[in-house]
Image (tube, rainbow, N blue to C red):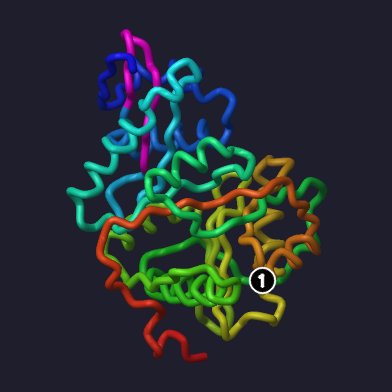
């Protein structure tokens, strides 16, 4: 293996070379640019012979650290990816708030990378279908939607935890854990309020969603309001809003086995490829396996 050094990211020195290295991976390029804007302290660059040879980046010191890892073609299969991952995991182990890390959107056909992750004790958390929709706007639903605001956190947390717990349970994704509220998430969500939406019915929040650019990143309806058409109306509103903002295509990911795929097909989405989420845990597994009983009551 070539002699290497891992340095903290410096925009002027590194950005152009990193974008060039990531040019064949639109998802990694997008995540890198977001981290450059919001989490530049957590981008680390490997240099070999004064050239950018790889990078690892994650989105902050928090409960779940989302990773990207890339090595330039000429330096692959030489152990540099392992060194970069070890560098990041040394940081994770110093911060108890980080419970686990994960790689999102690992392509099903990327056999070499999947084998690498498995060798580093990452395991598949769930598999999902990437879906896309092109075309005109949908009939405008008559619903009350607004952006996330101060005071929404506990309602958001309850819907997110319960709805996704039930979804994971229904498709057999284990372990499925409950994550209690965190003060750090309150400020994090508020900073991200422009990308977060809530649906109001009966003077309360009944559904939540995150939209980034043209991606409908997540959508969840409170269990007691499911199967009543709210998911379809909320998704239609969000799709129309994405199109109104100048995008011609709407994308999303849906877990394999999730019945919501039928809803998205009804709204005009088509499957494009399969991907996987790979997860590694760093803390003793002492968390609750399910939300508290009072949160599960309808």
Quarter of the image for the N terminus: give it.
Answer: top left
Residue 240: quadrant of the picture:
bottom right
Element assignment for label 1: helix
| Side of 130 relative to 223 (left or right) | right
Q: Nearer the viewer, residue 297 or 90?
A: 90
Q: Is residue 114 left or right of residue 69?
A: right
Rendering coords of residue 23 (x, y %)? 56, 23
Q: Is residue 38 above or below residue 127?
A: above
> Magenta span: helix, strand or loop, mainly?
strand
Depth order, front residue of 181/18: 18
Q: Which residue is mark 1?
A: 231
Q: How many marks?
A: 1
Residue 257 vertical placement versus 229 (above, below): above
Is residue 206 visible in the rendered structure shown here? Answer: no
**Residue most extreme to the left:** 94
Looking at the image, can residue 225 be seen?
yes
* Residue 17 x, y percent position in the rendering: 44, 16
Q: Residue at x 73, y 46 (%)?
A: 272
Taking 165 as reference, is 181 left or right? Answer: left
Residue 127 % position (x, y): 59, 56
Which of these two is toward me, 72 or 236? 72
Q: Is residue 201 magenta?
A: no
Which residue is depicted at the point 51% across and 37% down? 113
Residue at position x 66%, y 49% from top?
274
Name the spot of residue 136 as percent of width and height, x first. 82, 49
Q: Badge 1: how crowded within 10 Å, few (<14), some, or many (20+)?
A: many
User: Does residue 16 lie above or below 243 as drawn?
Assistant: above
Please say if 75 is above or below 137.
above
Magenta stretch: give its range.
45-58
């Amino acid at each position: 293996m070539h002699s290497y050094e891992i340095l903290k990211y410096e925009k002027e020195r590194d950005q152009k070379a990193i974008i060039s290295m990531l040019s064949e991976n639109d998802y990694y390029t997008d995540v890198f640019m977001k981290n450059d804007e919001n989490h530049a302290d957590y981008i680390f660059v490997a240099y070999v012979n004064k050239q950018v040879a790889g990078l690892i980046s994650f989105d902050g010191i928090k409960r779940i650290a989302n990773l990207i890892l890339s090595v330039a073609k000429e330096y692959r299969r030489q152990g540099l990816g392992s060194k970069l991952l070890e560098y990041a995991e040394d940081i994770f182990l110093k911060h108890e708030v980080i419970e686990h890390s994960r790689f999102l959107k690992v392509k099903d056909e990327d056999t070499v990378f999947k084998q690498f992750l498995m060798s580093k004790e990452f395991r598949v958390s769930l598999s999902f279908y990437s879906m896309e929709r092109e075309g005109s706007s949908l009939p405008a639903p008559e619903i009350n939607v607004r952006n996330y605001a101060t005071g929404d956190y506990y309602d958001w947390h309850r819907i997110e935890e319960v709805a996704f717990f039930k979804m994971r349970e229904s498709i057999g994704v284990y372990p499925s854990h409950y994550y209690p509220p965190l003060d750090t998430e309150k400020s994090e969500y508020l900073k991200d309020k422009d990308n977060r939406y809530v649906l109001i019915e009966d003077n309360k929040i009944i559904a939540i969603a995150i939209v980034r650019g043209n991606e409908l990143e997540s959508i969840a309806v409170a269990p007691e309001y499911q199967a009543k058409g709210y998911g379809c109306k909320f998704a239609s509103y969000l799709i129309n809003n994405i199109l109104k903002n100048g995008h011609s295509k709407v994308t999303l990911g849906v877990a394999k086995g999730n019945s919501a795929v039928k809803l998205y097909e009804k709204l005009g989405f088509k499957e494009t490829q399969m991907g996987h989420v790979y997860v590694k845990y760093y803390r003793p597994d002492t968390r609750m396996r399910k939300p508290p009983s009072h949160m599960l009551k309808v």
